[in-house]
Image (tube, helix red, strand yellow):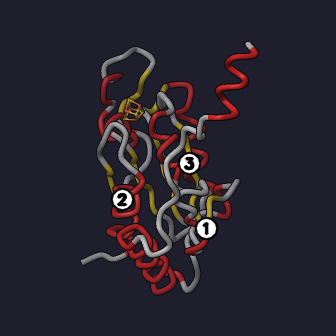
Amino acid sequence: MRRILFQSLLKPPLTEAAPAPDDGALAELAASVERAARKRLGRSLSIREVDAGSCNGCELEIHALANAFYDLERFGLRFVASPRHADVLLVTGPVTRNMQEALRRTYEATPDPKWVVAVGDCAADGGIFAGSYAVAGGVHEVVPVDLHIRGCPPSPLQLLKGLLALLTPP
Ligand code: SF4
């Protein structure tokens, strides 16, 4: 035990290096999302995340958007605690039968204009859980979906690209 403690004092922490201050792609993408949101809504974007039955892999990537590494709040993108304050519902997982009603109510509680983004392969069509007796199917089986972001799980960069596509229709 003493040896492990001593080693942990000498070793550097196991973590990714912080992005360089001028790390282009991510900052540019996030700034574009912020600009597109201001153009469409006249303010920054509020996001409510709904786990409809995922394995939590997709959540980890979504939560990464708010951590110190990506820190998207600096671009005005906010995660909110209530659907009543949200513009976008990010829904993950196959919709389990237990979450069906909760997802429907969350959708109804979100004011217009609103968008629903199905995040991950499971949210698109049930993914690896498709056909399970406990699963109702993809998110579109329960509420209307505006955009699917595929991946198992999709990366934070893919999530940002999806949000940008959502806010800047052709
Ligand atoms: S898409 Fe992959 S990571 Fe996301 S909930 Fe399904 S199995 Fe988990």
Residue labelled with disc 3: 63
Residue closer to the observer: 26 or 13: 13
Q: Quick one: which residue is furthest to the left in this view?
A: 170
What kind of element bears circle 2?
loop
Place of residue 46 in the rendered image (x, y in percent of width and height, measured from the top left): 59, 66
Place of residue 77 in the rendered image (x, y in percent of width and height, measured from the top left): 57, 68
Task: Look at label 1 and name its amino acid.
Answer: Glu
For the point 31% across and 19% down, the residue is 131
For the point 47% across and 45% down, the residue is 61
Chain-order first, disc 3 or disc 2:
3
Within-10-Å neighbours for mark 3: few <14, some 14–19, many 20+: few
Task: Look at label 2 and name its amino acid.
Answer: Asp
What kind of element bears circle 1?
helix
Task: Look at label 3 and name its amino acid.
Answer: His
Place of residue 9 in the rendered image (x, y in percent of width and height, measured from the top left): 70, 33
Q: Quadrant of residue 6?
A: top right
Within-10-Å neighbours for mark 1: few <14, some 14–19, many 20+: some
Using residue 44 as the reference point, say whether residue 148 is left or right of it. Answer: left
Residue labelled with disc 2: 146
Q: Quick one: which residue is furthest to the right in this view?
A: 2
Disc 3/disc 2 C-alpha distance (Å): 21 Å
Disc 1/disc 2 C-alpha distance (Å): 23 Å
Residue closer to the observer: 67 or 55: 67
Chain-order first, disc 3 or disc 1:
3
Q: Is residue 77 above or below residue 91?
A: below
**Quadrant containing the C terminus in the rendered view:** bottom left
Of circles 3 and 2, the one toward us is 3
For the point 54% across and 43% down, the residue is 15
Q: Is mark 3 within 8 Å of ligand 1?
A: no
* Ligand 1 quadrant assignment: top left
Q: Quadrant of residue 30?
A: bottom left
Q: Give the number of the disc on residue 73.
A: 1
